[in-house]
Image: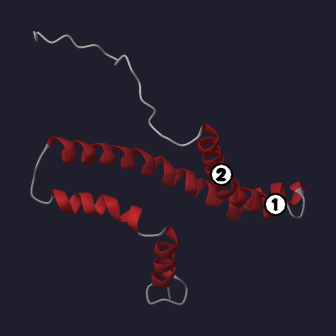
């Protein structure tokens, strides 16, 4: 044991920030407003377009065989992709944190690529590669 007596938490607290409380709340409010616009504006647009001809037309389109096939395929792919993604993600996290090995930097780079490439750019590349007028799609 150490001879020095430790007290936790410390008896005197210093403020983490020096801004006025009203400024902090204003900044938090602005960030939340922007976040709400970024989250809810696309949802509102999708639902307004889907319901533009009324809820009956939207519900009728769900009984279309192509819609049912698309829903079935989405659920099937998700049923396989989610557990595989979880298993490989946990395994990669465990390897990265527990061991040092040759190729660790490459593995981390491969994991980080989706965070650095815009989904719009990735989607454009996929459409240009596999679209109807591409070399692979024709």
Q: Give percent across and percent down for residue 67.
A: 69, 61
> Front-most of 101 and 84?
101
Q: Position of residue 44 (x, y in %)?
A: 76, 57
Residue 12, image quadrant: top left
Q: Which residue has dot 2 on it?
A: 30
Q: Is residue 129 left or right of residue 113?
A: right
Whether residue 63 is visible here, answered yes or no, is no
Q: Position of residue 117 (x, y in %)?
A: 42, 69
Kindly state the secondary structure of the residue where label 2 is placed. helix
Residue 49 occupies which quadrant of the picture?
bottom right
Mark 1 lies on residue: 48
Which residue is painted at 9% across and 58% down in the image? 102
Badge 1 marks a residue whose secondary structure is helix
The residue at 23%/42% (across/down) is 94
Give whichever of 22, 125 is nearer the camera.
22
Name the residue located 39 percent from the left edge and 66 percent from the top edge: 116
Image height of 70 relative to 1, above or below = below
Q: Relative to residue 71, is residue 133 drawn left or right?
A: left
Up-down: is 103 above or below 127? above
Camera sees residue 44: yes
Lower sequence index among marks 1 and 2: 2
- Left-right relation of 3 to 92: left
Q: Would you call the spot at circle 2 few (<14 residues within 10 Å), some (14-19), or many (20 or more)?
A: few
Q: Position of residue 71 (x, y in %)?
A: 63, 55
Residue at (49% x, 41% y) in the render: 18
């Amino acid at each position: 044991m150490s001879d020095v007596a430790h007290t936790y938490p410390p008896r005197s607290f210093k403020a983490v920030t020096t801004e006025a409380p009203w400024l902090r709340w204003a900044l938090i409010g602005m960030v939340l407003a922007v976040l709400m616009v970024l989250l809810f504006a696309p949802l509102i647009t999708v639902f307004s377009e889907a319901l533009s001809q009324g809820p009956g037309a939207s519900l009728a389109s769900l009984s279309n065989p192509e819609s049912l096939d698309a829903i079935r395929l989405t659920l099937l792919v998700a049923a396989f992709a989610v557990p595989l993604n979880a298993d490989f993600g946990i395994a990669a996290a465990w390897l990265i944190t527990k061991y040092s090995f040759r190729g660790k930097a490459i593995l981390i780079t491969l994991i980080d690529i989706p965070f650095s490439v815009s989904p719009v750019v990735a989607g454009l590349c996929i459409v240009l590669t596999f679209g109807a007028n591409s070399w692979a799609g024709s």
